[in-house]
Structure formats: C-alpha cells, structure tokens
Image (cartoon, rainbow, N blue to C red):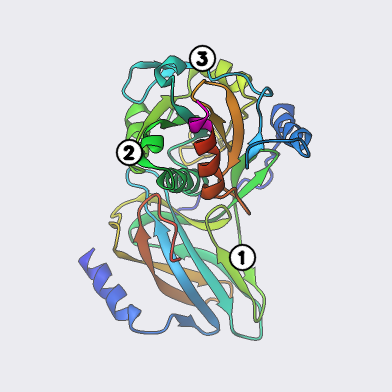
Amino acid sequence: MRKLLLLVALLATAPALAADVEVSGAWVRLIPGGGPSAGYLTLTNRGERPVALVDAECAAYGMVMIHRSVESGGTSRMEHVDRLTVAPGQSRELAPGGYHLMLMKPQDPPEVGDKLAITLRFADGQSLEVPFTVEPPYGQGPQ
Amino acid sequence: MNRKPRHQARTRLVPALAAAVALLLAACGGQETSYNLTDITGKMPDLKFRLTGAQGDIRTAADLQGRAVLMYFGYTHCPDVCPMTLGRLKMALAKLPEALAERTAVVFVGVDPARDTPERVRDYLANFHFPNAVGLIGEGKPFQRLKERYHVYVQLQKDGPEDTDYEVTHPSQVYVFGPDGRARVLARMSGKEPDTPKALAEDLRRLLKGS
C-alpha cells in the first residue's frame, strides 16, 4: 500500500493527461467488506478524434469493470459496458446512478481519505493512471 | 486479466408486476396530494412483514410502530445505486430536527440472501450511521409474501450456479410509511434526476407532525 501511495503522490503533481484525455472529480465510494466498490470521474476529450475507455485496472482490486446502472419500470439493474466513447470536445460523466467503475475482489482495499490509483485504458492503446479520492459509502463526491 | 464472461445476450424481462408500479405512478399524476413525492396513500397496503433480522432474530412491522419507515430493497454487493439511495436517505434525515429523525427508521431488505447474510447486512447498514435502521434478510416464503404485497421485482442475474459476482435487479424506489404504518409515498433516490433529500425530508416532517 505504501508503494502505491508513493506512486500516487508522485503522479498527483503531474496533470492527469493521456494525450487528449483530461480527467476531473475522480472519487471512489468505498464499501468495506468483501463486496465491490464504485469509482466515478469525468472524462473530457480535448483532442480532435473520439477516445474510448475500454478497461481499467487497480492493484488493490482483483477486477475492475466498466458498468452502468440503468433504471426502468421501477427497477434498477447494472449492465457491463465494453467501451465508453467520448466525442472530441465533449465530456462523459461516470457518476452515481449511471456509468461507474466497478471495483471487484478487494485484495488490499484503501481507507477513507486515501488516494487510490486506478489505471484507465483506452481503445488506442494509451493508458492513464488517475488518483481517486476515497470516500465513505454515503459519500457524494466532490461538491 | 481474469475477465468475467459478458452476458449482453441475456434477455432482461421486467415482468408485469414491476410495470404495474410504473402504471401506478402514472395513475397518481395530476391528483391532489399533500406530499412532494409520489403519493401512494390507499394504493399500497399497510406495512407488514415478518423476516429474519440482521441480528438473527425475527422482526415484524409491530417493532416499528410510531415511526415513519423508509423501506428499501437492495443488496450488499451493490456498489452504486444502493449506497447512493441510502446516502441520500441519510441526507434527508440530516435535514430533520433530531427528534423527528429519531422517529424515522430505515428498513433495508437484503434481496440476495446467499450473499446478504445477517452479518453482511448488519455491517453494510452500519456504514451509514442511521439513527434507526433495521436490516432484514429477504429469504423464503415470508419474503415471497412481502414481494407480492408491494409488487417488488427481484432478479439475480447469474451466469450459472458457479457465478458469485452476479448483479441483481431490484426496485429503484423507497417505500415510505407513516408512523401509523400506512403506505404514503414512493421516493426515488437514484438514477437520473432523483427526488431530492429536501423533498423527502419535508414529506417525513408532514408524516411525523401529523401523528
């Protein structure tokens, strides 16, 4: 964990940019116990071509998936998302009740207040390591 | 990387029961109501259940007499919608004077009994520090009766018997009962443009002051 935090500390001083993707408001809703937690952020495409988030990885979790919560007919369900495309000049929000990163199989879960490094992988092969602020289960994210 | 098989091909049928709730919502539109949220007075039965609680004991609605009740059907492996909902219930209660918040109970029914063990439900709920919270295990015939009573649709989205990372389809709204046990409003605390904690807090104030 210490190694991870050090890495995040180093990264935090650099602007979070992978080519043309800018991220903001990255936070994790930490659910203690063996179950999954959720990661949220806003992706902005500053480039001239579409970018697509296709995968994410985190050393503290055995598996990370892109999910979307969907409501219809009075019910909520989750579905897997293969790719989340952001058009040039546009932003996509991963936010509570919609798209989110599903952090599964906790191995070395963080604590509230930590910065958790999650690597985002894009369709063009680029990746971006992003520090997520860890909030409690009832957290509402950066206001 | 160890990936879970995807299951886009799965048909996701929301049965008539869940659709009935949506119809019910539509039917309520345009009607005079003294509440901010969707009025279900006279459209849903009084609070009644008998289920194993998170302490391993049997709990019934009689335990909650005199309290406003926020009943939600979720599961402990739910990282997004359930904590979003419970977090917003917490925000609503924080807007009430302490005496009124103390007279409100959050009832969380774990709809995934294989993973929602009493211990897990207890720990999950404890994360939210509600003034009063009751965890219930949605299991067996008593749960079947409760689901039928409130038109609750639950579907475990399992890829097979070995799948332990499955998602669960569950109701998105919170059933709000007055201190007299009567069903009063439905609160939708997740999804796009959810009801606000303020709107719920005002309705709870009405329910508790009127008793």
The CA distance from mark 3 to mark 2 is: 24 Å
Q: Residue furthest left?
A: A2
Whether marks 3 and 2 lie on the same chain: yes
Of badges 2 and 1, the one in the foreground is 2
Mark 1 residue type? Leu
Could you tell me how many numbered marks the image carries?
A: 3
Residue beneath the point at 57% across and 15% down: B145
Residue segment shown in magenta: B207-211
Residue beneath the point at 61% across and 65% down: A84
Percent coordinates x, y for residue B43 in the rendering: 69, 24
Looking at the image, residue B23 lies above or below residue A112: above
Dots 3 and 1: beta carbons under 8 Å? no
Quadrant where the image shows the N terminus of chain B: bottom left
The one nearer the camera, A14 or B23, is B23
Mark 3 residue type? Pro
Task: Find residue A52 and report its image quarter.
Answer: bottom right
Of badges 3 and 1, the one in the foreground is 3
User: Which residue in the structure is indicated by mark 1?
Assistant: A84
The CA distance from mark 2 to mark 1 is: 34 Å
Chain under callout 1: A
The one nearer the camera, B202 or B9, is B202
Mark 2 residue type? Ala
Chain under callout 2: B
Whether marks 2 and 1 lie on the same chain: no
User: Which residue in the structure is indicated by mark 3?
Assistant: B142
